[in-house]
Every structure is written in C-alpha cells, then in structure tokens.
Amino acid sequence: MPDTQPAAVITDYAALRGDIARWAADLGFGAVGIAGIDLPDDEAHLLEWLAQGRHGAMAYMAAHGVKRSRPDELAPGTLRVISVRMDYWPDRAAEPWSVLADGRRAYVARYALGRDYHGLMRKRLQKLADRIQAAIGPFGYRAFADSAPVLEKALARNAGLGWIGKHTLLLARDAGSYFFLGELYTDLPLPIDAPASAHCGSCTRCIDVCPTRAIVAPYRLDARRCIAYLTIEWREAIPVAMRPLLGNRVFGCDDCQLVCPWNRYAQPAQLPDFAPRHGLDGAALTELFAWTEAQFLARTEGMPIRRAGYAGWLRNLAVALGNAPCADEIVAALRARADDPSPLVREHVAWALAQQAQRRAQDSAR
C-alpha cells in the first residue's frame, strides 16, 4: 500500500461511502460493500482446510500463511476493504443443461466463455480508486482481483454482498452466484456494512448434484475431487476413477450453481466482454479437439481457458470424447491424436479409445 495518510479533510466518511457506491455502479460493478479486517473464524476454517490437504496441488494456497486472512499483514495500514461484485452470466449463451445432456458437445463453465476478468476488474478497481482520490486527495490502497492471497468470499460476506453457500461460493439474494469479486484494501476509516445473513436453509441441491461428490459436507469442499480443479489447476493425468464422472465438462463445472434456487435471480453481464467467443458455449468436442496449438493460443487469447494450457485442454477433451456416445467421427478424432507429442495427451487418448471400443462392443452385444 502506498505510504500515504488518509486525507485529513474528510470528516463525513458516510457521505464518501455513498459516493463510492455511485462510482462503483458507474464502473459496471453490481454491488459494493465495506468490510473490516478481522477474520478469526475464517482463518481457523482456512487452516483446517489446508491441514486436511483439501487444496490438493495448489501450493500457493498455503504459501502465504495467514496473510490471506489478515489483510493488514498483506497490505500494512489496511483498515477497511471495499468489496465489489461484477456479474458475468451470459444470458445469450446456449442453455447449460442442454449442452451437458449432449455428450458430443463440450461444456465450458459459463464464467470462462468470454474475456478473462482479472485484468478488467483490476482496471475498474483502479478507476474507482482514482475517483476516490480525485474527491479526497491521496490515500492508501491496493487493488486485488484474485491476484493475491485474499479471503475474498469472507470479506464480501462481511461487506454485506452475500453469504457463503453450502457449495462454498458466495450467494446474493438479488444475484445468485454468477459474479466475480474484487477488493480495494484501504486505509480510509469508512463505515462498515452489516454482514449478510445466510439463506440456504435445509436445501442440499448443490451437494446432491455434484458429479464427483467434491462437496464433502455443507460448506466443505475437497478441491481434489472438484471438476474445476481437475480440469484447470491439476496438471497431471486425471485419476482414472474420476474420468467417467467428468462427462463432457472440459473446463470447469457449474452444476452446483445451475441447481441453486437463488440463481433464478442471477443478473446478466452488463459488460459485453463476458459474451461467449468462438461458439464455446456449445461447440462440438471433435471441432475443439482438432485445434492446433496455434489456433488454441489465438482463440483463447485473453480468456480464462488459456490457463489450462494446450496439453491440458487436449487432455480434458480426450476424456470427454471417451465419455461421448460411440461414433465413428469421435474414434477418428481420437486416432488422429494417438501419437500426439505430449505423453499426457497420448495417455488420455488411449484411455478414450478403449472406452469407445468397450462401448461399441456393448452396443454390438445388445
């Protein structure tokens, strides 16, 4: 955080809070709230989760120790956190359940169909900070958009933006869960908003629908079983036992959100940046599997899908093709990559071909 002092001329921080809300709305944020920096219960939950190894190979989750749960240690001088929400639901995308039901098509998590939000969110947060500074003079702040060890869901809950649901995602009564979060850590003593109350009740739809049973208990997620983790964060071979459970989900998973009753109130994206690109809201698996590395890099530029890497992308598609209905064009697509330069891809292609052969034999026996 810059070595500055809060502007001494400001005495009405409540009025400034109202201005921040207006400026945030002007910048495309769906909601804004102010939180304090004390997160003792959430820190205990984080440390327990890490001790149980449920973060899998995401070593960065533990690398920063308790800086994640202590904002003033990550950014010394922090007194408050301005938490913001940016809606991303692509309301003109192909209907999710219809894509999931069609084993020949690829399902990409709805957040990943358009532009990567990280840079966009940070730029908007910087503009918000600029608006504040223009009004009050220099002040201390740092902007984050999933770019540092931040307990963003806990802070957003304390800022009144929503509650943490049983699937461990943030839920808002007026917006469901299809949104991104960002933060401005600041040294301004702004008035703190009331935390949001929880409204999941006895509902367990998110737990019941999870294909891999990654939600091991209410509010408890084992990332090692989560399809989002397996298709994005995990760089090695996908465990064989997990592969049939992935279905046609090739980048992320939305099932726990799709069944959530609160997402009937999901707000469509206000920015065109999150609109689907390259027909990825329901493209044929064989079409995507035929992309060269150059095509992959060109077509995923500035998109979240780039994070999987080309080999990871082909690995995920191979699994989906192995799970697809038996068809000559699917077998042909797999055989075309049987000698792929990547051992990771070759192994998953061999598995997929075996799955297709087994399915063909079963069909012939009927």
Image (cartoon, helix red, strand yellow):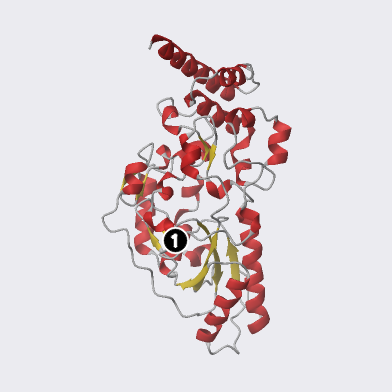
Asked where in the image residue 144 lies, by quadrant, the reply is: bottom right
Q: Residue at x 48, y 49 (%)?
A: 61
In front: 253, or 192?
253
Residue highlighted by disc 1: 265
Q: In the image, 149: left or right of 362?
A: right
Asked where in the image residue 306 lies, by quadrant, the reply is: top right
Residue 158 seen: yes
The quarter of the rendered structure image containing the N terminus is: bottom right
The quarter of the rendered structure image containing the C terminus is: top left
303 up-or-down from 22: above or below? above
Report x, y in % for residue 169.
Answer: 42, 54
In front: 353, or 79?
353
132 up-or-down from 226: above or below? below
77 up-or-down from 164: above or below? below
Q: In the image, 270: left or right of 170?
A: right
Residue 57 seen: no
Q: Residue at x 66, y 63 (%)?
A: 123
Report x, y in % for residue 182.
Answer: 55, 62
Q: Residues within 10 Å of mark 1 (few under 14, many from 20)?
A: some
Q: Secondary structure at mark 1?
A: helix
Report x, y in % for residue 158.
Answer: 41, 68
Q: Residue at x 58, y 72 (%)?
A: 25
